[in-house]
Image (cartoon, rainbow, N blue to C red):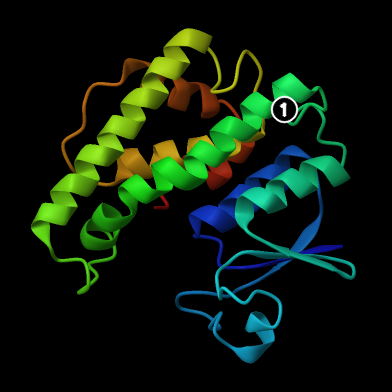
Amino acid sequence: MLKILGRPDSINVRKLLWLCDELNLAYAREDWGRGFRSPKDAEFVSMNPNSTIPILIDGEFTLWQSNSIIRYLANAYHGEALYPTQPKQRAIIDQWIDWQGIELNNSWSYALMHIIRQSPEHQDLNQVSASIASWNEMMQILDRQLAKTQAYVAGNEFSLADIAMGLSVQRWYLTPFEKPECAQVKRYYNLLSQRPAFLRWGNNGQN
């Protein structure tokens, strides 16, 4: 059985949990991270030198980095419907997964740590404002992409990219600050909310 190390309210852990539901994969999960066992423990660091969650253990195989893990699970456990093998289709999905992991994640980091985590190290209000502005700009990029597809982020069909993106959209909506009107993002969020696995791991009030 697959083993997932990480707390279930982590956005990156929830990527794995959502995908496992979509693929009907059985797994066991152990609580690690804020409020639980520390990822800085030697046992954890021996598996992931970055001390970050999640970690996936599949038999003797261990993997970290959430976007790498969801790609692995789709490849290893018949997830072709979500992660097609055709190179151009897959490249577009990878493009948006990587955009979520780099541009979008970097935009929200400071604002989230200030507003939600109330981190004493993130109290520079100019940086908070810059982070919010960047975050909103990224969501407007997503809105324009969704206006093109009129469906999901990478095209007409639900894909692996939507698992990464859907959780990011939820985080944007749940973090309190002034937001631009993004009609396509709202439509997309409602579309994802028709999926039981998203209601369990995405549209569930967790930030």
Quadrant the N terminus occupies: bottom right
- Label 1 residue SS: helix
State the image quarter where residue 37 is shown: bottom right
* Vertical relation: 79 (above or below) 37: above
Q: How many marks?
A: 1
In the image, is 67 to the left or to the right of 105?
Answer: right
Q: Amino acid at mark 1?
A: Arg
Identify the residue at horizontal 18%, vertical 42% (top origin).
Answer: 177
Q: Residue furthest bottom?
A: 42
State the image quarter where residue 84 is shown: top right
In the image, is 11 to the left or to the right of 4?
Answer: left
* Vertical relation: 168 (above or below) 185: below
In the image, is 35 to the left or to the right of 110?
Answer: right
36 or 204: nearer the eye? 36
Q: Is residue 176 visible?
A: no
Residue 79, how many percent across, how many down? Answer: 81, 35
Identify the residue at horizontal 58%, vertical 75% (top origin).
Answer: 32
Residue 113, how many percent across, how many down? Answer: 28, 61
Identify the residue at horizontal 32%, vertical 16% (top origin).
Answer: 183
Q: From the image, tell me which residue sits under label 1.
A: 90
Residue 62, how many percent across, how many down? Answer: 78, 67
Residue 94, how many percent across, how many down? Answer: 64, 34
* Vertical relation: 25 (above or below) 5: above
